[in-house]
Amino acid sequence: MIQRMDSNNRMSQIVVYNGVVYLAGQVDETDKGGPIKEQTANVLKQIDELLAKAGTDKTQLLSATIYLTDIKTFGEMNEAWQAWVSPQGLPTRATVEVGALAAPQYGVEIVATAAVKG
């Protein structure tokens, strides 16, 4: 059975299927246009909240894809990531530079998948 949460007329923030939690790409809705380190920390907090809603947490991460609008901010993003990620749940990860995200104030977007805890 597919379980969808926090859905609107075009997408779901969370989809759970066959023991895997898929999150939609997350951007910082609280600090629009702030420094990348803070945007990343806010996005990671949102990911924590979504994973909890799905019954899991960051120790169960499987993979993450990080999109940056400027690869020069990789170090800033990585500082926030390193402070957040659990040594017991290191996922596979890719970081790529993109021309733009959904709105110009967003400098980072993160897509994550995790196993259901249990």
Image (tube, rainbow, N blue to C red):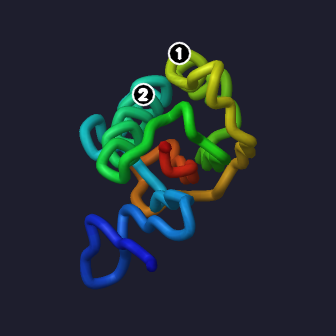
- Image disc number at residue 83: 1
- Identify which amino acid the numbered label 1 is placed on: Ala
Is 107 situated above or below 17?
above
Residue for point 47% across, 58% down: 23
Most foreground residue, 32 or 83: 83
Q: Which residue is disc 2 drawn over?
A: 41
Q: Position of residue 64 (x, y in %)?
A: 63, 46
Q: Disc 1 or 2, which lies upstream in sequence?
A: 2
Q: Residues within 10 Å of mark 1 (few under 14, many from 20)?
A: few
Image quarter of residue 98: bottom right
Comparing 70 with 16, the one in front is 16
Secondary structure found at label 1? helix
In front: 6, or 54?
54
Residue 55 is labelled as none
Q: Is mark 1 in CB contact (under 8 Å) with mark 2? A: yes
Instruction: Give the percent coordinates (x, y) of residue 47.
Output: 41, 42
**CA gap, disc 1 and disc 2:** 9 Å
**Image coordinates for residue 36, horizontal then vertical, percent:** 48, 30
Callout count? 2
Residue 118 image position (x, y, % from top left): 49, 44
Task: Spot the residue most to the bottom.
Answer: 9
Residue occupying the point 26% across, 84% down: 9
Horizontal placement of 13 versus 37: left or right? left
Quadrant containing the N terminus is bottom left
Horizontally, is 6 left or right of 64 in the view? left
